[in-house]
Amino acid sequence: MSDAFEGPRYLVTFGPKRVPHCFTDVLILGGGLAGLRAALGVDPRLSVTVVTKDDLHGSSSQWAQGGIAGVVDPEDRFDNHVADTLTAGGGLCHEEVVDAVVREAPTRIAELISWGTRFDAANGTLALGREGGHSHHRIVHALGDATGREVMRAVIERTRTLENLSVWPDTFTIDLVTDDSGCRGAIVWNPAHGKTIVWARRTILATGGAGQLYRETTNPPGASGDGMALAWRAGAALRDMEFMQFHPTVLYIAGGARSLITEAVRGAGARLVDREGHRFMPEFDPRAELAPRDIVSRAITVVMHRTHHANVYLDLSHLDADTVRARFPGMAEICGKFGLDLARDRIPVRPGAHYMIGGVTVDDAGRTSVPGLFAAGEVTSSGLHGANRLASNSLLEGLVYGARVGAVVSEEVLAAGADDEDFRVPALANPRAARSDIGAGTLDLADIRNSLQSLMWRQVGVERTGAALGEALGTVEGWCRYVLPRQFADPQGWQLQNMLEVARLMIRAAIERRETRGVHFRSDHPGPHEEWRAHIAWRRGRSGPWLEPLPRPTAARD
């Protein structure tokens, strides 16, 4: 991207002599499931600091409804779960990654139960749901449709037993701090203390996704791609940035929050109908409503265009009303606030940005391309999801990779020695000395953010074309040129800068991939092509992207 304005390396001016310092063995950026599972996996002899810009209840993990996929039914097999994941992934999954994660799922689910997670049960055994793309009932869930809330409750309670853990809530990470040896920690900010440099022997990114780049999204306000932007500015490799997954069924009511309607509703038998009540999914896929998310989202978009209507509808009226209300109490309550009966009325839905499949490139232990920097969860591209994530594999990924990075950073730090004398503060040059355009000036940051979200939804949404993407890139480049060089004094400005950095990468990647694969639907290139069966990877300072081939499996699965 040397032909485009890249923006500064750091968003703020700082220097070691002008800000307070904090020292920790392991710094974890993000307080969702991946971050807290990593904290639980760190050796208790090491100090751990978790920095989160909200609190431990504000992550996307907390909002997860459907559940966690895992082979816990004797009638199911690991190979079935693997095959379903590979099929959904559109040819871009790493088979060995998928196999390893799937085989670890029962252990992670059992671990959550041992920590006090109360999954739904029937007749003394786990109640298993089925969602789109799954060939078997294998989704463990809790509180009907509030799995994330229950899982996070148990995990947060578990972290409170850790004497080596400090949590910094309401703290925004401005940038990773790097020198020639790699990542040395981060510069963070909160209202009480201003800027602080947190020096760490190892840093773990677990900052979540980027759904807030879109006007229609299921993600909480904090999901603005911050971790991807941090890693990008620090020189880490990113890949698969064109793959944003749109959830097919987001409640669409004027004045209401865009609440996700869990895929488990369709797994329980809900039907998708158009404005005339016609059930349309069998026309698009033999699996009908249980097709993978990319297929269902695309079908809904086609039907909306065909019927000139802003949404389609979920219909559960043919199911037992008491069962529906008992199984999905959260959704029944939300719909009730708008005068809708989930069990009787047609529920207006349309797709919304839901899960960022691309992100920071990591290996099977969560290592990034920057020494000392690890990552886990939605902020990463691990090879698990390919071009389209299989439902309920996201919490699973956070658990598995959180556990892995917690163990690996412990091994590395302890092997290197953990004496306080090992902390060496480098002489960092003033990162922004030449800048004179300081401050927000007359910029209306909310207006730019709203304009970005609307642009991304219109031109980088479910259906894409080269012409629309090119226009979007020109607009975002223009915003970057006058927003990125400025120094802001609070998270509103830094978050917008991060969103622009990530949006530009997403658009560039979507332009590069001249095919349709998984969640990336190019109507001007409607089919997949073997030449594009590879990752599109990026790194700051390079002349452009490069194609990264998929690894070949080294051994047959059992």
Image: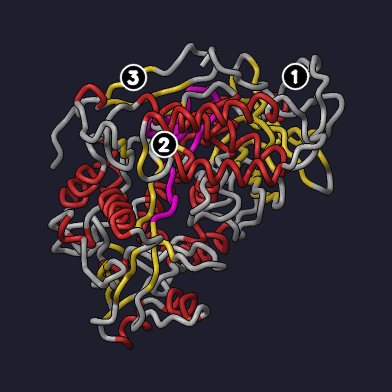
Judged from the image, the secondary structure of the residue bearing numbered disc 3 is strand
For the record, the magenta segment spans 351-375
**Residue 140, x across and y down, in percent:** 32, 65
Whether residue 158 sits left or right of residue 554 in the image: it is right
Give me the disc on residue 431: 1
| Residue 475 screen position, x and y as percent | 56, 30
Q: Quadrant of the C terminus?
A: top left
Disc ID at residue 547: 3
Q: Nearer the viewer, mark 1 or mark 3?
A: 3
Q: Is 112 in the magenta?
A: no
Front one among 517 and 283: 283
Q: Say if 221 sits above or below 555 in the image.
A: below
Neighbor class of circle 2 (other Cα within 10 Å; few <14, some 14-19, many 20+) is many
| Residue at x-position 52% and y-position 35% | 503
Q: Position of residue 434 (x, y in %)?
A: 80, 14
Q: CA distance from mark 3 to mark 2?
A: 14 Å
